[in-house]
Image (spheres, grey):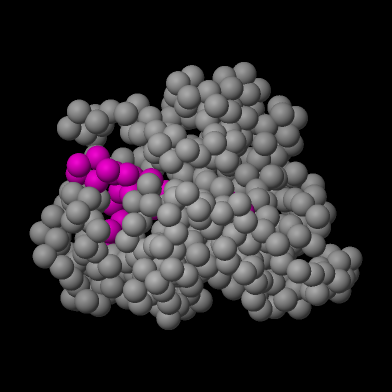
């Protein structure tokens, strides 16, 4: 273990002491109340206000998306401890691999140039695209991959907030570009994690697990390491740690990974989550089932029991109200469980909410829409879990509504 005393002395906790309850006090902080204050007067606001004196408790409905990256560097010890403190019952490690095929927590195999200080180290020489400064109308660029580093080399890097400055003329300037509604106040001393370390940490925190097998940036097989080897190694690390399959929701955007787990590891495959990125297909329309690459019934017949599309695919506007989309209705009718992503990754919502709110942009005029959307997803769509970059918001709602 490489976790320091700054994280509640977690390094001193042996695996035998994995807690049944979180060893951290759960605290909502000010954000849920802030968002509730932004709601218009009505039944939802009154209900949420009535719960402001409740005792915070952990909820599996609340999923930490890369921890709590609104304020902490994603996929770090600190980000996940923060998410656990907000009551997230399930925590995420996006999983990729190093040159020596060790599994580590990174959102993408090729994001080191925006999530770590690699460009300021001797390891910058390993980047597949070296830093190139902005010039005229040309943005600054770089691309650095975990697959170019050994695990030992990866562990020397310092994590930072995921950002880059396209106007940078130096590698130091490229480290900037943090969105105005995020912060770098909580980056000092942040620690990277291997996937195995994330398992130990999450278990100690009393949380469950939802690892995502990330699509490699390198051609597979990679030096003899096949896609199946990659998918299997993910499962094997939970088995080695003695984690029951019922506490794990494996994820992948690659349907073949999900089908592999269903066939090769049926106990884990029973809760495998198909991350649906059908929105990348030309002509896809969440409100027109004829445009779906796979029908919900066909997914169910192949053993898939969980689908996870982005927020906007599950809702639409009807007579000025947020209502379930055809996609949501089709998935529910087929017997599929629905998880969605990602709440609070959009910043202030006064100007439409951007990509995650695109199907309800006309209703997205104030920050209270975070709770209005969440309420429709929970009560009308029937989602069983919501990823958030600041899990306290979802935890508060789940506890207030008895989910």
Residue interval drawn in magenta: 88-115
**Is residue 89 on the magenta stretch?**
yes
Residue 31 location (% of width, % of height): 65, 75
User: Can I make out residue 37 in this image?
Assistant: yes
Look at 26% across and 72% down and name the residue there. 174
Q: 284 and 75: which one is in front?
A: 75
Q: Determine whether 94 is above or below 30 in the image.
A: above
Can you say whether 379 is above or below 53 in the image?
above
Picture coordinates of residue 198, whole percent (x, y): 42, 52
Instruction: Left or right? Give the position of 370 relative to 195.
Output: right
Q: Is residue 150 or residue 69 the one in the foreground?
A: 150
The quadrant where residue 42 appears: bottom right
Residue at 38%, 74% (x, y): give it: 187
Q: Quadrant of residue 292?
A: top right
| Residue 164 higher or lower than 376, as above or below | below
Residue under the image location 76 percent in, 60 percent down: 399
**In this orientation, which residue lies closer to the viewer: 175 or 57?**
57
Q: Does the magenta stretch include residue 80?
A: no
Residue 204 percent location from the top left of the image? 51, 55
**355 vs 362, nearest the viewer:** 355
Outermost residue to the bottom: 185
Please provide percent x and percent y for residue 118: 21, 64
Above-or-below relation of 363 to 33:
above
| Relative horizontal placement of residue 144, taking residue 372 as reference (left or right) | left
Is residue 252 among the parts visible in the rendering?
no
Determine the residue positioned at 20% across, 42% down.
Answer: 100
Using residue 108 as the reference point, say whether residue 201 is left or right of it. Answer: right
Residue 23 occupies quadrant: bottom right
């Amino acid at each position: 273990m490489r976790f320091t005393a700054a994280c509640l002395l977690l390094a001193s906790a042996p695996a035998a002491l994995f807690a049944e309850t979180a060893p951290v006090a759960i605290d909502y902080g000010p954000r849920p109340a802030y968002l509730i204050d932004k709601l218009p007067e009505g039944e939802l606001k009154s209900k949420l206000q009535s719960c402001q004196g409740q005792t915070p408790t952990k909820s599996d409905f609340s999923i930490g998306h890369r921890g709590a990256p609104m304020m902490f560097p994603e996929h770090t010890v600190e980000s996940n401890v923060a998410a656990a403190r907000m009551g997230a019952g399930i925590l995420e490690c996006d999983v990729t691999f190093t040159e020596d095929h060790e599994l580590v927590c990174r959102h993408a195999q090729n994001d080191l140039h925006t999530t770590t200080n690699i460009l300021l180290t001797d390891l910058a020489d390993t980047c597949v695209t070296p830093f190139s400064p902005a010039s005229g109308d040309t943005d600054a660029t770089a691309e650095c991959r975990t697959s170019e580093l050994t695990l030992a080399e990866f562990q020397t890097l310092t994590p930072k907030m995921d950002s880059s400055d396209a106007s940078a003329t130096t590698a130091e300037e490229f480290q900037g570009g943090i969105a105005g509604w995020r912060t770098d106040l909580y980056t000092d001393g942040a620690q990277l994690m291997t996937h195995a370390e994330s398992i130990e940490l999450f278990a100690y925190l009393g949380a469950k697990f939802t690892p995502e097998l990330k699509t490699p940036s390198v051609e597979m097989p990679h030096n003899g390491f096949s896609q199946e080897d990659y998918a299997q190694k993910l499962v094997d690390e939970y088995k080695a740690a003695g984690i029951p399959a019922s506490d794990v929701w494996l994820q992948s955007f690659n349907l073949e990974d999900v089908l592999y787990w269903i066939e090769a590891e049926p106990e884990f495959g029973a809760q495998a989550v198909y991350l649906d990125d059908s929105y990348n297909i030309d002509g896809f329309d969440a409100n027109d089932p004829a445009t779906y690459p796979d029908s919900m019934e066909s997914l169910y017949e192949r053993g898939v029991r969980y689908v996870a599309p982005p927020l906007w695919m599950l809702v639409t506007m009807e007579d000025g109200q947020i209502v379930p989309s055809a996609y949501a209705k089709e998935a529910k009718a087929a017997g599929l469980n629905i998880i969605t992503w990602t709440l609070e990754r959009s910043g202030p919502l006064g100007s439409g909410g951007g990509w995650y709110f695109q199907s309800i942009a006309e209703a997205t005029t104030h920050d209270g829409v975070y709770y209005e959307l969440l309420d429709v997803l929970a009560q009308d769509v029937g989602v069983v879990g919501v990823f958030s970059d600041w899990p306290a918001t979802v935890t508060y709602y789940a506890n207030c509504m008895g989910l």
